Image (cartoon, rainbow, N blue to C red):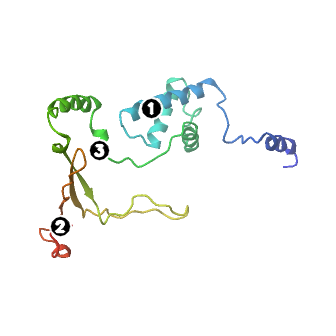
Amino acid sequence: IIRRKEEYLSDYGSNCNKRINRKHKDDDGQKIDELVFEWFTIQRSKNIPISGPILQEKARQFAEQLGYLPDEFKASNGWLEKFCARHAISFRLISGESASVHHSTVEEWTKRLLTIIEGFDKNDIFNADEAGLFYRALPDRSLVLKKEECKGGKKSKERLTILLCSNWSGTEKLKPLVIGRSQRPRCLKKHQYI
């Protein structure tokens, strides 16, 4: 520490952290970074889920195309972490069904629907949607100690399917339709509606 005293003091004075803000030493490293990020954005625009190992393998492929030997560029976990930090990429749980519909289909149906409902009053146009309620499901993510082994159990399949319906103006909301497994659940025997 004493031998590198001047270096540490100058780093402290300039408030720089060499470990985090390290730049690529060559233009090829930056080129790999750009190619991987471009590929990543294209895949995500197609709603394709990308994991860390997939991103690392793609970086290795681009490095090979640029002439790197396998021991010259290693897309390590550290590289992945810094790549994600540079481009503000975070790993999240993907949910919902919006990725299963193509934008062209949605646009086509939007135009067609406007012509179909043209002559109707807003109070006479209804929309219904179903939702699944997994009432015994545990969350699929948790905060844990670093030493703790993170194991999950079986996911509960007990659920209710709920159908919600309302008119366009919101003045008429129909009672929700709830469907479960039991024909007459014991817990609801005194209730006709939930």
Disc with the residue nearer the chain's start (2 vs 3) = 3
Mark identifier at residue 41: 1
Three-letter amino acid code at disc 3?
Glu
Disc with the residue nearer the chain's start (2 vs 1) = 1
Residue 98 placement: quadrant: top left
Mark identifier at residue 75: none
Three-letter amino acid code at disc 2?
Tyr
Which residue position is annotated with label 2?
A: 193
Left or right: 171 as drawn, with respect to 23:
left
Disc with the residue nearer the chain's start (3 vs 1) = 1
Left or right: 114 as drawn, with respect to 43:
left
Q: Which of 163 and 97 is in front in this view?
A: 163
Left or right: 130 as drawn, with respect to 95:
left
Residue 93 in the image: x percent, y percent?
Answer: 41, 49
| Quadrant showing the C terminus | bottom left
Label 2 vs label 3: CA separation?
29 Å
Three-letter amino acid code at disc 1?
Thr
Which residue position is annotated with label 3?
A: 97
Left or right: 145 as drawn, with respect to 132:
right
Q: Residues within 10 Å of mark 2 (few under 14, many from 20)?
A: few
